Image: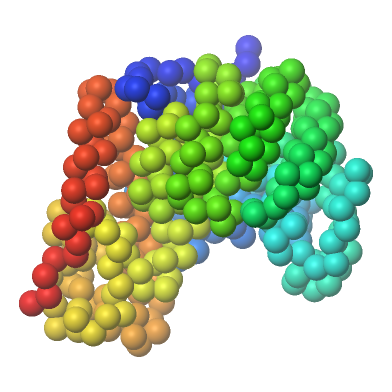
């Protein structure tokens, strides 16, 4: 018995509604995964993250291997127990972050050697070590180890990098082995080149994975280029497996990705924005730092049922941000995560009802209105 499965329950155009089943619970798709970089979604208690409607969290292999260390987490009972989150966890492979954060990194066929950005200690990440770390953490959905060039990059660089990632994907599959109850996802690369995306998809399908990510996007190419790629890239991947768009995104990126057949996404944006005084609402982005909120007794969004909107005014949120109080980031992060999950639920319902186009039209119309008028 596989103990994990993916079932598509409805479709509307290219948009898909489904469910991933794991021993730790079901993940309703399309799903948004909040990012718990260092075994915490910053500013949120795990039960609060669950209360926003999240079925799954993302953890970062690169951060956790450096601090507190994968072996230590394993000795302490695994990442779920360590961070008090019993639902599913997806971990990235470390490949993307080692290239963006680590120092003195050296890329070879074997893997990437680097120095920690925290204390300068020497480490090596390979497909085999990445699989080992993700197993030690106890991740439910494991990502294959890959390399992702920043865009723009020339075609030769993207081709070489993609082919290296495909060789690493095969090594990841081999090292992952047979682990009932756990899933391994492959990652499609190839930049914005359609033929390279196709070559990558064929290589991954030949290896065989439990799910497939569209990697190498949301790295500076812009929404128009990303959507152009999503017009063809997801359909190159198996129909009957989940498709995950890594590192996306803003609310309108998410709606556009789901429209193009994406089932899962993750992004630090709702939590990071929450800490910098930015709120995401149905009417777009609100900068709570702005002086216009200082005397405003109204909630951020009068229709939102999150604790920040039920219990606090814009004036209070403005004040605690200005005063540097911790509750500022806590409340805005909660609101943002709540909004993102409500957005996902709205899309899931719309796909079931066969009215994704109507949902999308309403989504854009509401945003076009902009924030409520100042008092
Ligand atoms: Zn709210």
Residue 75 can be seen, yes or no: no
Residue at 70%, 52% (x, y): give it: 153
Residue at the image point whose x is 23% and y is 23% from the top: 353
Residue 192 at what x, y percent from top left?
61, 41
Instruction: Give the percent coordinates (x, y) of residue 179.
Output: 72, 25
The answer to whether residue 48 is above or below residue 91 is below
| Residue 156 in view (yes/no) | yes
Asked if residue 101 is positioned above or below residue 205 in the image, the reply reads below
Q: Quadrant of residue 327?
A: bottom left
Q: Is residue 120 left or right of residue 365?
A: right
- Left or right: where does residue 304 sit relative to residue 279? left
Residue beneath the point at 41% across and 58% down = 270
Task: Give the colour scheme shown.
Answer: rainbow
Position of residue 244 measured from the top left corner of the image (x, y, whole percent): 54, 35
Most extreme residue toward the top, as rendered?
1
Q: Residue at x 70, y 29 (%)?
A: 200
Left or right? Give the position of 23 relative to 288: right
Q: For residue 193, what is the image quadrant?
A: top right
For the C terminus, the quadrant is bottom left
208, above or below 149, in the image: above
């Amino acid at each position: 018995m596989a103990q994990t499965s993916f079932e598509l329950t409805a479709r509307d155009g290219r948009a898909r509604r489904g469910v991933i089943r794991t021993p730790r619970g079901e993940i309703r798709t399309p799903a948004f995964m909040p990012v718990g970089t260092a075994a915490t979604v910053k500013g949120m208690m795990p039960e609060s993250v669950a209360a926003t409607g999240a079925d799954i969290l993302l953890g970062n292999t690169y951060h956790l291997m450096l601090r507190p260390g994968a072996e230590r987490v394993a000795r302490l009972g695994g990442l779920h127990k360590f961070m008090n989150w019993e639902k599913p966890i997806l971990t990235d492979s470390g490949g993307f972050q080692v290239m963006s954060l680590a120092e003195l990194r050296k890329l070879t066929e074997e893997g990437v050697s680097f120095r920690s950005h925290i204390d300068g200690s020497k480490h090596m990440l390979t497909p085999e070590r990445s699989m080992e770390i993700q197993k030690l953490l106890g991740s439910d959905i494991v990502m294959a180890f890959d390399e992702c060039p920043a865009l723009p990059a020339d075609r030769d660089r993207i081709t070489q990098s993609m082919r290296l990632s495909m060789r690493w994907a095969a090594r990841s599959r081999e090292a992952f082995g047979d682990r009932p109850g756990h899933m391994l996802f492959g990652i499609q690369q190839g930049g914005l080149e359609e033929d390279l995306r196709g070559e990558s998809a064929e290589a991954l399908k030949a290896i065989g994975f439990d799910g497939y990510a569209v990697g190498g996007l949301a790295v500076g190419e812009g929404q128009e280029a990303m959507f152009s790629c999503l017009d063809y890239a997801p359909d190159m991947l198996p129909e009957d497996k989940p498709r995950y768009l890594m590192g996306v995104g803003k609310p309108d990126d998410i709606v556009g990705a789901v429209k193009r057949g994406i089932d899962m996404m993750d992004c630090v944006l709702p939590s990071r924005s929450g800490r910098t005084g930015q709120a995401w609402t149905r009417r777009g982005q609100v900068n709570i730092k702005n002086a216009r909120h200082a005397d405003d007794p109204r909630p951020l969004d009068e229709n939102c049922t999150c604790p920040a909107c039920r219990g606090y005014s814009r004036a209070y949120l403005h004040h605690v941000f200005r005063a540097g109080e911790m509750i500022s980031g806590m409340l805005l992060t909660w609101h943002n995560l709540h909004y993102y999950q409500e957005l996902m639920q709205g899309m899931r319902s719309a796909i079931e009802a066969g009215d994704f186009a109507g949902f999308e039209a309403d989504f854009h119309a509401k945003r076009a209105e902009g924030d409520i008028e100042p008092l």
